């Protein structure tokens, strides 16, 4: 299961501290001072080329202070009346120079925080991409004629094909190549299942309401937007305040309702649209509730993820797999989250497609036989050490990351590598893809390690795939709630004497001590590692009580000797019974597709260079249409030849369209480039035709009977454009692009 969030990225480096002081130079030294100022400004410009946001903010504050002091000096000179005109002019020149330096510092700070030209460029790109996608019907707001519903979108014809191609490749890359068991479970889920998983109690966001209109907002979004806007737009923000806002952004996910409400009040945050005061934050469960059956007594929910359907079927899937581990089960399906205030288009919606894998493995053996296949992959990784030290993601070899313990185990590492290959083969830019490790405050208490595949787009770094080692938490939770043991067995060739750690919590004593928090304390005790349990045992025997951290409560509790029994017992066993660990890669398909749209989009000038033409450089793998067929002119023979080619393409299973409109061939090329069609066949003869490649705009001449075979090789990756252009003659003629 993946809980996706947008996280801002900060930029770090260094800055010299030499700042010019206010000065009133005498007339005789004015020229020399001006020369020094020009030299100093140039030196500062060079040294600040790669400076940090913090240092830039300090520099701007100091320069602004210098400007204020110099302005005061100019006013004093003018008011005193005793200064010569030359001295006043010199002071004014010094003030102008300081203002220039302050302006340069402000522009650099704007660039560092994304509020300058870079931010405008990202917004311009986003608008161009979204406008093209909606105009070409890749996707549109749902129920548009009724003014739509926030967070719901319809995929149009080309969008449906892109999505189908992405999912088809996902099945090929994971389900088929890894021999996974695919299942398809209902979207409506009984309440008891989601109580066991923790969703009924914990799947919430904190919400605030406009006290006058009742409009709802996500509390953390309001606080995040306020802090980001201050950091990006208030260039005179004191360093202490800037540091405070950054700290708030860093711990945003950990703030309680009370802490979040206190910050909203402290900063004077109000409703964005009406400026009305806001209520205190309170939890809102994101699941859509429904009822099963006509009485309404059986409560259900629209599933917020697809994973639970796999977990509850573990026993049958394990039997189907011949009672062998490891094995993986996969599911593609719709999930539903009743977002409080959806935004960012396809990135945060109320109904979306998830593709999830649950790889069940022996917790004592997380080696992977195929890890060697991905060990040499090198890509951007962002382990927690780099995040905590304020550094950027770095290129790392996956094998090194696993061998050094940065990635917890080989199986987790193997899936990180496979996710990297999947995303890059789809067309995601390698330079804008990174794998970020969860920080300690993000990790669930039961998780061994978690990484997110994050893709950079105009909204920043977006979590698109979560890859987590969830240990045995999910199967244990459903075993306890259902009473059905979801376990695996390892049979021994001969009996073994084993020493086992036995943790027996006293539910009665825990209930008396912790009341409503009993379940969370119980889960934490049962999830203890052997080392933790033995340390607790020693403390209880010597002191009678010990402090114990319960992550789900966010605090330490006191455990006494009566509350838990911990012992090591020797037993003779014929088999080992254990709860498998789960490695879970979870893919947000809509998010991946939107990032693919942005990464594939570019513009190029038309032949006349009077307009820019939009192009999606989709790889043939995901392109909505693989090929277009154009009769060069309106001619019955050419039309008949086009139909022959179209029939051959259909037989070969290649999606295509025929365009016989009367507009120029160049305009027809441009029209299909805009929806990302990689190849175009132009019929200008009844015996041989041309095939054009979208991005290079190169053309080759091919016999009409070979067209379907050549296009099939290209679209299925059996041949590259370089291969076929070396084999077939190039075409350069009057039908060249006229866009």
Image (tube, rainbow, N blue to C red):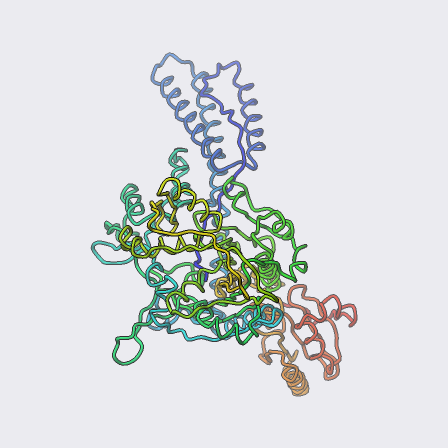
Q: Is residue 87 left or right of residue 658?
A: left
Hey, which residue is sitting farthest top in the picture? 82
Q: Which residue is nearer to you in this view: 440 or 118?
A: 440
Residue 53 vertical position relative to residue 372 in the rendered view, above or below: above
Above or below residue 734? Residue 240 is above
Q: Quadrant of residue 623?
A: bottom right
In which quadrant of the rendered image does the C terminus lie? bottom right
Looking at the rendered structure, the number of numbered marks drawn on it comes to 0
Taking 493 as reference, is 595 left or right?
Answer: left
- On the question of residue 610 being in view, the answer is no
Is 278 positioned to the left or the right of 609 in the image? Answer: left
> Which residue occupies 57% across, 32% down?
47
Q: Residue at x 42, y 61 (%)?
A: 348
| 237 or 79: nearer the viewer | 237
Is residue 217 visible in the rendered structure shown here? yes
Q: From the top left corner, tell me how far across and down residue 564 is, in percent.
A: 37, 52
Residue 576 in the image: state x and y as whole percent: 53, 64
Q: On the rendered image, what quadrant is the N terminus found in?
A: bottom left
């Amino acid at each position: 299961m993946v809980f996706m969030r947008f996280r801002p990225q900060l930029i770090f480096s260094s800055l010299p501290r030499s700042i010019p002081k206010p000065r009133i130079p005498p007339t005789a030294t004015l020229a020399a001072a001006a020369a020094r100022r020009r030299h100093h400004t140039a030196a500062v410009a060079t040294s600040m080329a790669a400076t940090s946001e913090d240092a830039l903010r300090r520099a701007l504050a100091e320069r602004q202070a210098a400007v204020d002091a110099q302005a005061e000096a100019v006013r004093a000179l003018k008011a005193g009346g005793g200064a010569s005109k030359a001295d006043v002019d010199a002071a004014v020149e010094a003030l102008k120079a300081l203002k220039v330096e302050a302006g340069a510092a402000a522009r650099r700070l704007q660039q560092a925080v994304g509020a300058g030209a870079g931010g405008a460029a990202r917004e311009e790109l986003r608008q161009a991409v979204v406008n093209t996608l909606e105009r070409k019907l890749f996707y549109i707001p749902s129920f548009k004629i009724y003014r739509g519903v926030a967070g719901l979108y319809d995929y149009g014809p080309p969008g449906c094909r892109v999505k189908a191609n992405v999912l088809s490749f996902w099945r090929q890359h994971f389900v088929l190549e890894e021999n996974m068991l695919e299942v398809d479970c209902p979207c409506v889920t009984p309440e008891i299942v989601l109580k066991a998983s923790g969703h009924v109690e914990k799947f919430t966001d904190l919400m605030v309401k406009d006290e006058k209109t009742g409009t709802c907002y996500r509390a953390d979004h309001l606080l995040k937007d306020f802090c980001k806007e201050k950091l990006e737009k208030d260039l005179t923000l004191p360093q202490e305040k800037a540091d405070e806002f950054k700290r708030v952004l860093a711990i945003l996910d950990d703030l309680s309702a009370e802490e979040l409400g206190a910050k909203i009040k402290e900063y004077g945050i109000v409703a964005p649209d009406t400026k009305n005061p806001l209520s205190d934050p309170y939890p809102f469960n994101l699941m859509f509730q429904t009822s099963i059956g006509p009485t309404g007594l059986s409560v259900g929910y629209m599933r917020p993820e697809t994973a639970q359907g796999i977990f509850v079927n573990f026993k049958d899937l394990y039997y189907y797999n011949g009672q062998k581990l490891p094995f993986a089960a996969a599911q593609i399906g719709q999930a539903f989250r009743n977002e409080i205030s959806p935004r960012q288009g396809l990135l945060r919606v109320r109904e979306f497609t998830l593709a999830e894998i649950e790889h069940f493995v022996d917790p004592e053996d997380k080696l992977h036989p195929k890890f060697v296949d991905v060990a040499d992959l090198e890509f951007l990784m962002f382990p927690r050490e780099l995040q905590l030290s304020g550094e950027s993601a770095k290129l790392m070899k996956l094998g090194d990351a696993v061998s050094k313990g940065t990635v917890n185990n080989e199986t987790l590492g193997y899936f990180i590598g496979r996710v990297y290959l999947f995303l890059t083969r789809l067309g995601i830019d390698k330079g804008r893809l990174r794998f970020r490790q969860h920080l300690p405050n993000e990790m669930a208490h039961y998780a061994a390690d978690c990484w997110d595949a994050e893709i950079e787009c105009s909204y920043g770094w977006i979590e698109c795939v979560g890859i987590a080692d969830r240990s045995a938490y999910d199967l244990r939770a459903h075993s306890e709630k259902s009473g059905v043991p979801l376990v695996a067995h390892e049979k021994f060739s001969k009996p073994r004497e084993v020493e086992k750690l036995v943790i027996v919590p006293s539910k009665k004593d825990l209930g008396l001590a912790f009341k409503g928090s009993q379940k969370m304390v119980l889960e934490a005790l049962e999830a203890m590692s052997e080392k933790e349990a033995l340390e607790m045992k020693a403390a209880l025997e010597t002191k009678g009580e010990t402090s114990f951290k319960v992550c789900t409560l966010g605090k330490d509790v006191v455990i006494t000797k009566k509350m838990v029994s911990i012992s090591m017992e020797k037993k003779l066993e014929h088999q080992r019974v254990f709860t498998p660990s789960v490695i879970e890669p979870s893919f947000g398909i809509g998010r991946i597709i939107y990032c693919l749209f942005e990464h594939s989009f570019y513009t190029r000038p038309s032949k006349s260079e009077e307009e820019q033409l939009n192009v999606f450089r989709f790889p043939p793998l995901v392109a909505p249409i693989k090929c277009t067929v154009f009769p060069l002119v309106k001619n019955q023979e050419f039309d008949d030849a086009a139909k022959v080619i179209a029939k051959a393409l259909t037989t070969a299973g290649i999606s295509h369209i025929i365009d016989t409109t009367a507009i120029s061939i160049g305009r027809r090329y441009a029209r299909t480039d805009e929806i990302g069609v990689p190849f175009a066949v132009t019929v200008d003869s009844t015996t041989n035709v041309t095939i054009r490649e979208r991005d290079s705009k190169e053309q080759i001449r091919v016999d009409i009977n070979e067209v379907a075979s050549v296009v099939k090789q290209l679209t299925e990756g059996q041949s590259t454009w370089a291969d076929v252009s070396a084999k077939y003659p190039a075409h350069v003629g009057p039908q060249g692009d006229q866009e």
